[in-house]
Image (tube, helix red, strand yellow):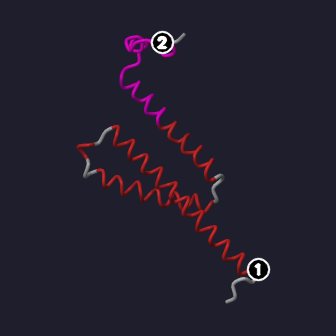
């Protein structure tokens, strides 16, 4: 078995040529992958397939949210670390799911109004 599979000590990993930087890069990439995977699964479970307008709104709003947060990060320069990154990612995910829910509610309202107009319930 490889040195990473048997749960050995950290010295075994260093003998394989992996340094702390390599291990940190591997864990960071795994964290990014798991974050995207969990986000995709949650999106598929709660929202199903997204309409093109929802994707477009999501990209537009996410761009501004990331930019605003990066500007706000300059205030908390001394407190930047792992916990901050986790909180930032959680905040971005919650904002994205809020925007998706808001778009879905707007879509349902628009459909209900159109159906009501077509059925003659609402008279102009």
Who's the residue at 51% across and 60% down the image? 99
Task: Decide: is 70 above or below 3.
Answer: below
Assign the N terminus to one quadrant of the image. Answer: top right
Would residue 104 be counted in the magenta stretch?
A: no
x, y percentage for residue 105?
59, 65
Who's the residue at 39% across and 28% down the image? 24
Q: Quadrant of residue 67?
A: bottom left
Residue tagged 2: 3
Q: In the rendered view, does 1 fall on the left or right side of 95? A: right
- The rendered magenta stretch, by its main secondary structure, is classed as helix
Q: In the rendered view, does 15 fall on the left or right side of 76? A: right
Task: Decide: is 25 above or below 123.
Answer: above
| Between discs 1 and 2, the one toward the N terminus | 2
Query: What stretch of residues is rendered in magenta?
Result: 4-31
Task: Decide: is 116 above or below 90.
Answer: below
Q: Quadrant of residue 118?
A: bottom right
SS assignment at label 1:
helix
Who's the residue at 43% across and 46% down the image? 90
Residue tagged 1: 119
Assign the C terminus to one quadrant of the image. Answer: bottom right
Q: Residue furthest bottom?
A: 124
Who's the residue at 36% across and 26% down the image? 21
Residue toward you, 25 or 119: 119
Q: Residue furthest left?
A: 78
Q: Residue furthest right?
A: 119
x, y percentage for residue 54?
58, 60
x, y percentage for residue 4?
48, 16
Q: In the rendered view, does 45 fall on the left or right side of 3? A: right
Q: Quadrant of residue 37?
A: top right
């Amino acid at each position: 078995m490889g040195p990473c599979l048997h749960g050995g000590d950290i010295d075994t990993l260093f003998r394989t040529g992996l340094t702390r930087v390599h291990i940190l890069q591997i864990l960071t990439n795994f964290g990014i992958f798991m974050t995207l995977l969990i986000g995709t699964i949650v999106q598929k479970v709660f929202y199903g397939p997204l309409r093109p307008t929802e994707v477009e709104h999501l990209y537009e709003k996410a761009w501004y949210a990331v930019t605003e947060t990066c500007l706000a990060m300059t205030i908390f320069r001394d407190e930047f670390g792992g916990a901050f990154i986790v909180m930032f990612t959680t905040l971005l995910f919650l904002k994205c799911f809020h925007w998706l829910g808001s778009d879905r509610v707007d879509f349902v309202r628009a459909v209900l109004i159109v159906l009501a107009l077509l059925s003659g319930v609402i008279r102009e």
